Structure formats: C-alpha cells, structure tokens
Image (tube, rainbow, N blue to C red):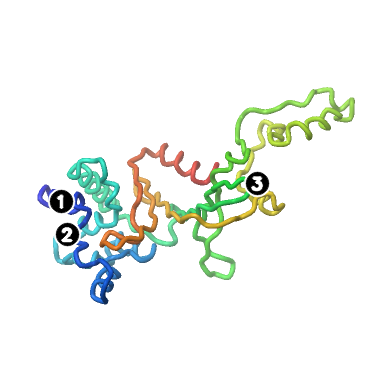
C-alpha cells in the first residue's frame, strides 16, 4: 500500500505529467488518448466509481486497480498545499469505506442531487442562486429531473428565522389599520408576520418570485453533482476542461462528516 501511495504522490505532485505526456491536442492519436482518459459524462463517472469501467492505462488484473481507478476520479488540484502522501492516504481511507459498504452510485439514488448555479436579475442586481434537482419518475414512467430545492435566497431577502413581528392584539377593533403602514414600511420583511408555527418554504418563495417576474433568469454558471451515498462522506463533482489526463467530470470537493453534519449539508444545499 505504501508503495502505491508513494507512486501516486509522484504522479499528483507532478500534476499528472507522467500520464498526460502525449495527450496535448495536436494530432488524432493524442486527441484519441485524451478522449479515452476523460470522464466525459456523469454516467461515465458513476461507471468508473462503481468499477464497471477503469481509467484506460490501468490493468484490470492488478490487485490494486480499484484504488488506483478511484484516485484518478479526483481533481489533482485538491492536493495543492497538502502533503501528497497524506492526501492520498485520505483518498485510500475514503475508498475503503466505499468498498466495505459496497456503495454503488446510480441515477435512481435518493442521495444524489444536481445543482445548477445560475444568475438571476433581482431589482436591477445580478444574484447567483443554486437550483437543486433530483432524479424522479414521471407519471408516464419515464425518468426526469425535478426541482426539489434552491439555495442562496438570503441574498434577496429570504429569511427563515424564528424571529417574528407582532400585530397588536387589539387591532381587530380598528379593522387592522396598522397593517396599512406595515405593508408600506416592511415590504422586504413581511414574511416575519407569519404565525409562530408556520414555516417559510424557500422553494415556494422562489417559484413565486419567478412566476411574478420579480426574479428573472439570466444564464447558467455551472453544474455540480452532490453525492451523499457514502457513509461519513459527502462529495461533489464538476466538469474540468483540460488537455491532460485528469479531465472531465471529477470529484472537486469532499468532506468526512458525521451524520448530523451530513444533514446540515443537505439542508444548506436545499435551502431549508
């Protein structure tokens, strides 16, 4: 194991130069090699994660092929500023949790989310929000993506807080005239007048702003995939466009977390 980690440390610390030699675009041979090495889609990422496919240069008969293949699914820049051997030991520990728990990624997983980071125009300002989607089955039986959450709404005044504004207990005697002024002065905080046990739903808030034209879509920024399938870990995947072997849909962030921390991560992702 130590020999493998040292070898990969050399590969990582040299920015995968060993593997990327000859992969710079310039002829059909190099382009073909780069194409094979690239993780070209999220489905291909899942296949490599599940060891249904392997990074092209690896030998399927190698007893350590699974670990080596797993390491090549990470963005090499995650190693920046870290001790290479220690970093690769972290990945080895991560891999063994995957193997021990027989984790397999799939489209039908309830612990897999897509997040579209997008720009919106709100009151003449551009704000970036995260639209979170999950794979579901339509009534027709066909698979599809459905929006299940949105994050970043605090940038435009959304407040899911226990704090509340109060309306005078005798306002019914004056036909609630006080609300005339509240509607004018507290427009951006009016949700704080809701009942103590009434929750504010971020997704409904988002849909209302979009449907009234208050929040206008401007363009896509990037797409992330979030995976919570592995016990004690969360990780995200995004696309890296490079002319070296370490390219395509790769793990761009990962965390070793407790069950409680994983739930916090999910709530923040969904904007709850």
Which badge, 2 or 3, is on the more N-terminal residue?
A: 2
Q: CA distance from mark 2 to mark 3?
A: 49 Å
Residue position marked by numbered label 1 in the rendering: 10
Image quadrant where residue 219 sits = bottom right
Query: Mark 1 vs mark 3: which is more N-terminal?
Result: 1
Looking at the rendered structure, the secondary structure element under dot 2 is helix
Label 1 and label 2: CA atoms lie apart by 9 Å
In the current view of this chain or complex, which residue is farthest to the right?
174
Asked whether the residues under the numbered discs 1 and 2 touch, taking CB atoms below 8 Å apart as contact, a structural biologist would say yes
The answer to whether 166 appears left or right of 28 in the picture is right
Closer to the camera: disc 1 or disc 3? Answer: 3
Lower position in the chain sequence, tag 1 or tag 2: 1
- The disc at residue 105 is none
Task: Point out residue 143 in the picture as x, y percentages from the top left corner.
Answer: 51, 66
Camera-side residue: 262 or 213?
A: 213
Element type at mark 1? helix
| Residue behind mark 2 | 18
Tell me the residue that label 3 is attached to. Answer: 124
Q: Residues within 10 Å of mark 3 (few under 14, many from 20)?
A: few
Q: Position of residue 262 (x, y in %)?
A: 41, 41
């Amino acid at each position: 194991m130590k020999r493998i980690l040292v070898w990969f440390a050399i590969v990582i610390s040299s920015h995968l130069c060993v593997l990327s030699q000859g992969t710079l675009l310039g002829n059909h041979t190099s382009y073909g090699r780069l194409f094979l090495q690239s993780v070209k889609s999220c489905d291909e990422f899942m296949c490599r994660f599940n060891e249904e496919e392997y990074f092209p240069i690896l030998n399927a008969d190698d007893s350590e092929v699974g670990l080596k293949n797993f390491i090549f699914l990470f963005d090499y820049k995650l190693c920046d500023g870290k001790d290479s051997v220690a970093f690769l030991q972290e990945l080895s520990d991560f891999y063994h949790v995957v193997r021990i728990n027989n984790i397999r990624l799939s489209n039908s997983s309830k612990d897999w989310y897509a997040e579209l980071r997008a720009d919106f125009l709100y009151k003449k300002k551009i704000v970036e929000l995260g639209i979170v989607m999950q794979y579901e089955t339509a009534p027709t039986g066909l698979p599809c993506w459905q929006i299940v959450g949105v994050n970043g709404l605090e940038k435009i005044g959304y407040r899911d807080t226990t704090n509340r504004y109060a309306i005078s207990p005798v306002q019914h005697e004056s036909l609630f005239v006080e609300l005339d002024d509240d509607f004018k002065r507290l427009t951006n905080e009016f949700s704080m007048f809701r009942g103590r046990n009434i929750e504010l739903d971020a997704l409904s808030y988002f849909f209302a702003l979009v449907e009234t034209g208050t929040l206008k879509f401007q363009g896509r920024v990037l797409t992330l995939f979030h995976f919570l399938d592995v016990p004690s870990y969360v990780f995200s995947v995004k696309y890296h466009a490079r002319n070296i072997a370490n390219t395509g849909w790769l793990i761009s962030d990962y965390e070793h977390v407790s069950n409680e921390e994983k739930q916090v991560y999910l709530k923040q992702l969904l904007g709850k």
